[in-house]
Amino acid sequence: MKTNIILALDNRRPKADGTHAILLRIVHHRIPSQVTTGIYIKPKDWDEKKRIVLPSYKGTETVARLNNLLQKKKTEAMDIILKLDEKKKLDALTVLQIKELIEKKTDRSSFFSYTERLISEMEEANRIGNARLYKFTLSVLKTFRGQKDLLFEDINLAFLTKFETAHLKKGKSYNGLSVYLRTIRAIFNSAIKAGLVDRESYPFVNYEIKSTKTRKRAISLEAIQRIEKLVLLDTHPLYHARNYFLVSFYLRGMSFADLAQLKVGDIIDGRVNYQRRKTDKPYSVKIIDEVRQILNIYIKDKPKEAYIFPIIDRITPQEQYKDIEWARKRFNNKLKDIAGLCNIDEILTSYVSRHSFATRAKNLGIPIANISDMLGHGDIKTTEIYLDSLPTALLDEDHEKVVR
């Protein structure tokens, strides 16, 4: 057999902290390639002759366990090669094809490696927002681990509890923690679905992801009408922000990201037809008079392929994502000024129109399932978070109906 694998330290590309990757170096028909193990150490902690990590390395609980892990990775890789050789398939493969097979096997054990692969796939599919969330969660976990690799088998009830404690000790909220944990859970579910992790290893069976109630963001219909009646010239710095807010409310609480990506061609037969970016689900919303008046201002003399609102300027998905995020920040700042002009005590943000639509619908007695569908939510539980509690006056009326 003309194929071999050894553990080696990559001396060519050090990281900013001076560490180097430990590699699985593959040689197939004298052609080399390599697979990273996801473990990084400094050259002084590597025994080149024995190809093991020296006891001087302090980045792990036990060096012996780390060396065992590296040997396990090497053994698993060699097992792939031996099986290919037994089936008489090895010689027909290129070294890059063998590398790909080994990388998939490495992903099976490394949570970090698998997450990085998911991020790459998201970026290729232009799911920039999700990729960004996964990157941020990955960064937090790497900091928590002190840059040590994280295996799927390491993530258990004890790990999640320890991660929670470390997060809360920093004075951070349960809601921030829940974002990270839901992302970890989604990655685990993806790995299970892909057959890379056994379902028995799922760590969230006995762990509850906690969150606290956030301040309700809905405002009254009377406050919405005050915003609508606000007289602003088209040269006023708050003109567009007021229009975006009203269009969002009257188009079933459309999110700012979906609003930004609406095109003239999405308006067909008196309806706005669009695909929600977060869920890819198609929606068709009737254009009422309040919305038509605003849309007519923006679509005049524009071709069908043009964006309706002046939010996105650039071409690539990554640049467009940045355009939307930057515009959202400016939008939120201007909404604070609008609240002041309209004597609204609540803090206005891009989410308020969406929450207000949902709460208004609930107060009118519209079933939550219908509200959920109008908002484009994947499940009713998400919708319930949006809904404000019923006004006291309505509860008083219901109370009297019961007792009299």
Image (spheres, helix red, strand yellow):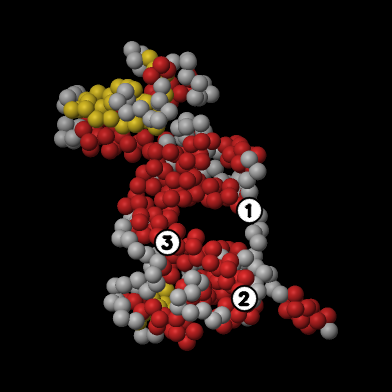
Q: CA distance from mark 1 to mark 3?
A: 28 Å
| Upstream in sequence: badge 2 or badge 1 | 1
Q: Which quarter of the picture shows residue 113?
A: top left
Q: Residue at x 51, y 36 (%)?
A: 143
Residue 276 shows up from this direction: no
Q: Which quarter of the picture shows residue 85?
A: top left
Q: Is residue 358 left or right of residue 3?
A: right
Instruction: Give the labeled residue for mark 2.
Output: 342
Marks 2, 1: nearer the viewer = 2
Asked if labels 1 and 2 touch by Cβ distance under 8 angstroms, the answer is no
Which of the labelled discs sits on residue 324, or is there none? 3
The amino acid pointed to by label 1 is Ser
Quadrant where the N terminus is found in the figure: top left
Q: Residue at x 43, y 55 (%)?
A: 129
Instruction: Give the labeled residue for mark 1.
Output: 211
Judge by depth and name the residue closer to the eye, 295 or 79: 295
Marks 1, 3: nearer the viewer = 3
Badge 1 local density, few (<14 within 10 Å), some, or many (20+)? few
The amino acid pointed to by label 2 is Cys
Which of the labelled discs sits on residue 347, or is there none? none
Q: Secondary structure at mark 1?
A: loop
Badge 3 local density, few (<14 within 10 Å), some, or many (20+)? many
Q: Is residue 47 above or below residue 350?
A: above
Q: Residue at x 55, y 68 (%)?
A: 335
Q: Secondary structure at mark 3?
A: helix
Q: Is residue 144 above or below residue 248?
A: above
The amino acid pointed to by label 3 is Ile
Residue 268: give x, y in percent of width and height: 35, 82
Which residue is farthest right? 404
